[in-house]
Image (cartoon, helix red, strand yellow):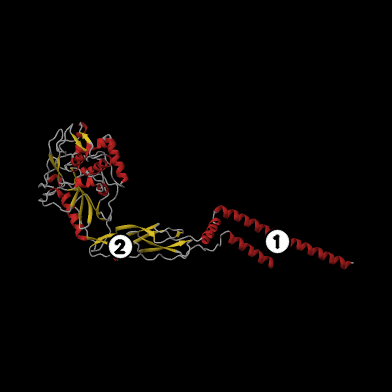
Amino acid sequence: MKCKKQLAALLLSITLLTGMAVPSLAEPETTDPAPAATQTTDDTAADNTQPAGDNDTDTAEPDDAQADTPTDTPDQTEPAETEPETDDKSPKISIDAGASILVNAETGEIIHAENEKEKKFPASTTKIMTALLALEKCSLSDVVTMQDEDFTDVKNGASNAGLKVGEKITVENLLYCLLLPSGNEAANALARVTGGSVDEFVQMMNDRAKELGCVNTHFVNPNGLHDDNHYSCAYDLYLMAQQAMKNSTFATIVNTAQKKLPATNMNAERIIYTTNQLILSSYSSIYYDNCYGIKTGHTSQSGYCLVSYAKQSGYTYYSVVLGAKAGSEYAGSFTETKRLFEWAFDNFRLKTATEAGSAVTECPVRLGRGTDHVTLVTADDVSVLIPNGAEVSDLDIQIATEDSYDAPIAQGDKLGTVTYSYQGMECATADLIALSEVQRSPILYALDCIARFFQLKAVRIIVGILVAVFILYLVLSFIAGRNRRKNRRKKRNARKRNNRKR
């Protein structure tokens, strides 16, 4: 009996040693995360009939009957996203266009989107990317000499800036010719001097689009002249405009209603006008005082397009409208864009969802010295754009963290994210960081290392073999001992019998 107890104790010790029953001294008690905390120049009158330098990139403006015919668009590569069902608190607007998007510049929140990632023909809104690359690669004071190749495909009725072969003009003034009257020859010249050739420049355009995160864009020229393989989408054009507007020169140019160009070797001093009716003349009914750009576009295939930017009372928005129709007085790209901006300024307000440093959640920590959890906060105030009448308490909060974290943890380490949504519409996402440092316990760390060592597959196999061999040795030793005891008993019994016989 004593031998059996010793054998059992030995087997238990071996089992503990292999980590099969190692106590989880380093593991914190698992608890549910704490609920997220909520805190609480001169103007010129203009109508819908454009002059020779209008925003039409390859054809003269169609009459109303033609414009009312639905425009051709490429096949979709991504299905249109369906909007979630919402209650009456969430304002809605329907835009009469092939695709549209409205984004708050402060939060990056998309508050309106229709077919925003579907392929559409961008027409002259292409020139946003052309201008962006020229500004990134060229000096504004560089002088460009216009060449014959710059006038390729600049046909009668196509938009142009009145430049001439052999004319010498600075990059800065070429940009005005590109973005105000939407000059196709200016686009070709900027592409040639920026990329070395138009083909090389087009490759640069596509590469830059990928860098910006564009999801459905492919360029084949720098001006937007129609090609079935030249396409973009409302979301991608927003990304391009957002990047371009970071350049102060670009922002100044696209907000210019008219520009006096100095005399050149081929042209006298003259004035060019923007094709953007929202900023052209304060005397027109479509003029919108809150608008600050950006770029128009039109072909018979694309319909009327406008990428725009507006700000009012501390609120700023980017808008893209593609494939709009001609209106009775002004193209639908202008009327629908103005409607979008007015709707946004009237219906949404910024509120603080979480203040900087306020606890959002807590997460378990392993191996910590003196603590088994870490508090997560946001580094900055998190602002959300929500409809008038809605409150921060109406937001849905989604926290993304690991199940637990291992010490050491430094103060400010990013450990997760928090996303705020309103009725299915994502409002803001922010990083969650550690509020304070969590040091590592040497003892818990040592125990954890031992446990992890014995959890290695190779170690488990070796230890298992050793345990099996040891158990076999004990069994064989026990059998051998029992046999020896039997033999001794037999010898004693034999001696006793022999003694009796004597």
With 497 as the anchor, is 13 left or right in this view? left
User: Which numbered disc flags the more N-terminal residue, 1 or 2?
Assistant: 2
Q: Does 181 sit above or below residue 285? A: above
Q: Residue 33 location in percent, x, y?
A: 40, 64
- Splitting the image into 4 quarters, where does residue 436 fall? bottom left
Which one is in front, 42 or 219?
Answer: 42
Q: Residue 70 location in percent, x, y?
A: 18, 47
- Splitting the image into 4 quarters, where does residue 221 fall? top left
User: Judging from the image, what secondary structure is the residue with disc 2 in?
Assistant: strand
User: Judging from the image, what secondary structure is the residue with disc 1 in?
Assistant: helix
Query: Where does the C terminus fall, quadrant-wise?
Result: bottom right
Q: Could you tell me the amino acid type at mark 2?
A: Ala
Question: What residue sits right under mark 2 in the picture?
Answer: 353
Which one is in front, 34 or 91?
Answer: 34
Q: Residue 102 location in percent, x, y?
A: 23, 53
Query: Where does the N terminus fall, quadrant-wise?
Result: bottom right
Q: Could you tell me the amino acid type at mark 1?
A: Phe
